[in-house]
Image (cartoon, rainbow, N blue to C red):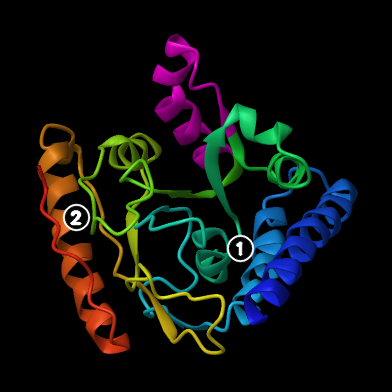
Amino acid sequence: MLAIIRIIALLIAIIIIPVLSCLYSLARPFHRNNVHFAATLMGKVVKILGLEVELRIPESVKGIGPVVYVCNHQNSYDIFTLSNAVQPGTVSVGKKSLKWIPFFGQMYWLSGNILIDRNNTSKAMNTIALTAEKIKEKKLSVWLFPEGTRSNGRGLLPFKTGAFRTALQAGVPIVPICGSNLHNAIKLNRVKNGKLIIEFLDPIFLTADDQKNIRNVTNSTHQLMLEKIEEISKEVGNEMPVSTVS
């Protein structure tokens, strides 16, 4: 019974929140803080899921200028859980086709996220340059998932280098964001589903020399995040599967 109530509440939320966000965004289309507004609403949904979220942001990150955020991508619940960590002036990068998804797509587009055409090879190759230019022009921060896909219980997957190349081109630091393991943690029939810790790590400042060793920087960031995710997952009592960089 609880699961049915939650599913109905989730369906209502994923219609009402995008509608409200679209109305808000129409008053100031593509404003740099529209995504933060929408994410704030989306983040409230964790209460429906019976999940507690603890956000940890070190002083080194508070008030920081444009950055590239890199975060682990676990499952479909990320749209609700990780929304609690989206900072003002932050957008994400998504497929152009997303804007055709009813309600959500229109919110995603109007709020000012960066849309790319992944089906067009020539355009896709320019994604890094385009994103870096948006960061510099509009003083935006960009949220990226370096795994490139949801891990779905497979641990922290190997990172692609795109986010790091974007940071280099834009001349901004990387800020890792780590979410504790959520695999099999949410049961819709359970009243309380425990706790999720989202912890920001200190900024990683890249230099021109890193251009030649971008894979090393990518792998070292992966290792830092892996260690932190394992640590906070143990803290909430939901250890993550073993993962290695390939």
Q: Which residues are magenta?
A: 115-137
In terms of sequence position, does the residue under pointer 2 or pointer 1 come before the other? 1
Does residue 136 belong to the magenta stretch? Answer: yes
**Relative to 207, does residue 80 appear above or below in the rendering?**
below
Residue 97 location in percent, x, y?
63, 28
Q: Decide: few, some or many residues near mark 1? Use Cα within 10 Å; few <14, some 14-19, many ≥20.
A: some
| Position above or below: 127 against 80 | above
At 35% from the left and 42% from the top, the residue drawn is 167
Q: Looking at this view, is 242 or 68 the one in front?
A: 242
Find residue 73 and report its image quarter: bottom left
Kind of residue at disc 1: Pro
The residue to which callout 2 is attached is: 222
Q: On the image, numbered disc 1 is attached to which residue? A: 88
Return the x and y of residue 165 as percentages of the image width and height.
Answer: 30, 35
Residue 190 or 45: which is nearer the viewer? 190
Whether 182 is drawn above or below 1: the answer is above
Residue at position x 30%, y 59% from top? 153
Say what secondary structure mark 1 lies in: loop
